[in-house]
């Protein structure tokens, strides 16, 4: 009598009906929107928070830093926690922890309690994005993953743009406390969907017998120290500050010891062997540089509009929103085209478009009008939308499903680090290049320039109202224009650097395997 064939449990993609899949996608997107919004939403309310809690400026910035540091530490641990507790339980716990800590942030009576609950909020939020990605990649079949990731990507890309605008509107019309309290109903709804609909895949089992405490401590020390360096370095003048120098040394040493530990210990807290997958490793490296340019321009464009062009914050936000429209449209198009064209072609085309748009920004001048600032941003935004979803889907789709949680955590860690490094480096370049350009411009000032002589003559005659008969105001106006021109030139340096990074990524994508040539995430192993 022959043995009955062993029943193979259905894959997550086979388990859910079509409607159930999209409810899972909705829960994942809500969790992502909450987390990404809270990374930026507090920025514009910081002054109100400082005033409301009677705190100093330096003290209040820990409201931002504490969240970023806690968030960065938890992200790479997502896969380990998912395997230890079960993915559904850990995902739901993270949503509820984020929601509860958001409530406590909104009710915080003083700065100390607010910073503490922001640390807790960052710990809850750190897992939301990588868990959302892992859940979506498992829930949808390979041919549907592109569209699912496109829907999820809308939430991910919406956060950096909506955060400052939404936070400013809430703060102006209500109270800074509502930027945290607004998360409560959204988080409870997302938790309800996860509880009712989501099921753990059959291959997620508790197979960890001991905790690698040394690995955990070294990773937390290294990532935490480097995030503080990136966040505080510019204000502290980088390595001229003993604190920044010490933290940088601690961060580098901690991460080097962490890598050495994880490569030798039997049960690592972060499984680095996933980087032996060529497609995932290259995709992760590319994401680091993409986020360098993406987050960098999110910061630089509003600054350029306000500092160099004299735009109001609202008008600067409109410039950024036009760029975002291109991103949103390209994301949806990329989701539909994912199974029809080689995704690597979309990524390389996106890098080329992003590079062209950003290179055109390197030709800005102080007399440029609104639409000549906005159109290059639209081109760059379309390019960014064509990059992100195909790149994420190809990189994670090449990983075995048992490694999905761990791979997604690492992927999002480098995304976060790439964005932080990009902002820190570009702002530092902006400040230092402005001084360099200012020195060069002053060297080439010609006191015998006919226009300058005409201004001196008008001042001497008293023909310019409010200036009197001395030359000092003319020199002041001249110095102000030199500063403005130097600032514009330093912005152009940053834009050209970002453009060259995008151009350099164009051929790099073809080192990744085309989907179908690598083992898909849903294949049995």
Image: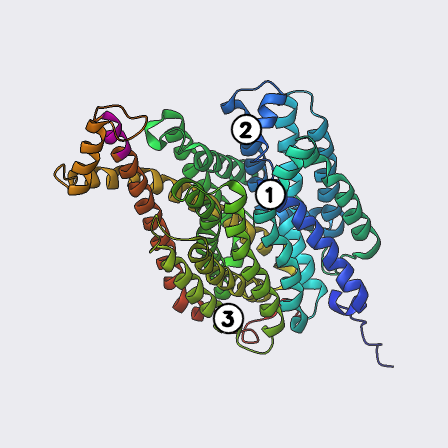
The relative height of residue 478 versus residue 376 in the rendered view (above or below) is above
Q: Is the magenta stretch mostly helix, strand or loop?
A: helix
Question: Regarding mark 2 in the picture, which secondary structure is present there?
Answer: helix
Residue 304 at x, y percent in the picture: 41, 45
Q: Name the residue under label 2.
A: 62
The answer to whether the residue labelled 3 contacts the one labelled 2, judged by CB atoms less than 8 Å apart, is no
Q: Which of label 3 and label 1 is nearer to you?
A: 1
Residue at 56% over, 51% down? 412
Percent position of residue 193, x then y: 80, 52
Magenta stretch encompasses residue 476: yes
Left or right, residue 244 beside residue 403: left
Mark 3 to mark 2 CA distance (whole Å): 40 Å
Structure colour scheme: rainbow
Label 3 belongs to which residue? Answer: 346
- The mark lying in front, picked from 1 and 2, is 1
> Residue visible at 30% across and 39% down?
434
Of the 4 image quadrants, the one containing the N terminus is bottom right
Residue 248 percent coordinates (x, y): 40, 34
Q: Earlier in the sequence, mark 1 or mark 2?
A: 2
Q: How far apart are marks 3 and 1 (CA)?
A: 30 Å
The structure residue drawn at horizontal position 78% and vertical position 52%, both measured from the top left corner, is 194
């Amino acid at each position: 009598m022959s043995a009955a064939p062993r029943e193979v449990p259905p894959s997550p993609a086979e388990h859910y009906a079509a409607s159930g899949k999209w409810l899972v996608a909705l829960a994942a997107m809500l969790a992502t929107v909450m987390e990404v919004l809270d990374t930026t939403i507090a920025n514009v309310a910081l002054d109100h928070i400082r005033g409301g809690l009677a705190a100093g400026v330096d003290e209040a910035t820990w409201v931002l830093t504490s969240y970023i540091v806690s968030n960065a530490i938890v992200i790479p641990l997502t896969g380990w926690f998912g395997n230890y507790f079960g993915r559904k339980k850990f995902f739901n716990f993270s949503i509820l922890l984020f929601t509860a800590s958001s409530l406590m942030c909104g009710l915080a009576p003083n700065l100390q309690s607010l910073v503490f609950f922001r640390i807790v909020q960052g710990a809850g939020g750190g897992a939301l994005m990588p868990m959302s990605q892992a859940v979506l990649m498992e829930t949808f079949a390979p041919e549907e993953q592109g569209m699912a990731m496109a829907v999820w990507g809308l939430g991910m890309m919406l956060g950096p743009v909506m955060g400052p605008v939404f936070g400013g509107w809430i703060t102006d019309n209500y109270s800074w406390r509502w930027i945290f309290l607004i998360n409560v109903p959204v988080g409870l709804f997302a938790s309800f969907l996860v509880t009712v609909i989501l099921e753990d895949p059959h291959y997620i089992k508790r197979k960890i017998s001991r905790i690698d405490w040394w690995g955990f401590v070294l990773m937390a020390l290294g990532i935490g120290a480097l995030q503080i360096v990136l966040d505080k370095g510019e204000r502290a003048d980088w390595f001229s500050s003993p604190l920044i120098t010490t933290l940088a040394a601690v961060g580098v040493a901690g991460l080097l010891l962490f890598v050495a530990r994880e490569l030798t210990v039997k049960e690592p807290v972060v499984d680095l062997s996933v980087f032996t997958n060529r497609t995932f490793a290259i995709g992760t490296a590319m994401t680091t540089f993409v986020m360098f340019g993406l987050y960098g321009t999110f910061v630089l464009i509003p600054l350029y509009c306000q500092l160099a062009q004299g735009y109001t914050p609202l008008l600067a936000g409109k410039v950024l929103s036009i760029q975002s429209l291109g991103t949103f449209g390209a994301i949806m198009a990329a989701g539909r085209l994912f199974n029809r064209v080689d995704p690597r072609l979309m990524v390389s085309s996106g890098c080329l478009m992003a590079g062209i748009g950003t290179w055109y920004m390197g030709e800005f001048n102080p007399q440029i009008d609104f639409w000549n600032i906005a159109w290059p941003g639209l081109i760059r935004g379309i390019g960014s939308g064509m990059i992100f979803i195909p790149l994420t889907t190809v990189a994670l789709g090449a990983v075995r499903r048992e490694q999905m949680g761990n791979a997604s955590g690492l992927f999002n860690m480098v995304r976060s680090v790439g964005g932080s490094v990009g902002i820190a480096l570009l702002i530092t370049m902006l400040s230092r290049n402005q001084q360099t350009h200012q020195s060069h411009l002053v060297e080439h000032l010609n006191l015998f320039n006919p226009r300058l002589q005409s201004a001196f003559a008008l001042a001497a005659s008293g023909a310019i109202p409010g200036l009197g008969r001395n030359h000092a105001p003319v020199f002041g106006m001249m110095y102000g224009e030199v500063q403005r021109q130097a600032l514009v030139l330093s912005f152009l340096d940053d834009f050209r650097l970002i453009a060259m990074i995008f151009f350099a990524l164009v051929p790099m994508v073809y080192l990744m395997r085309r989907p179908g040539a690598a083992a898909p995430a849903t294949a049995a192993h």
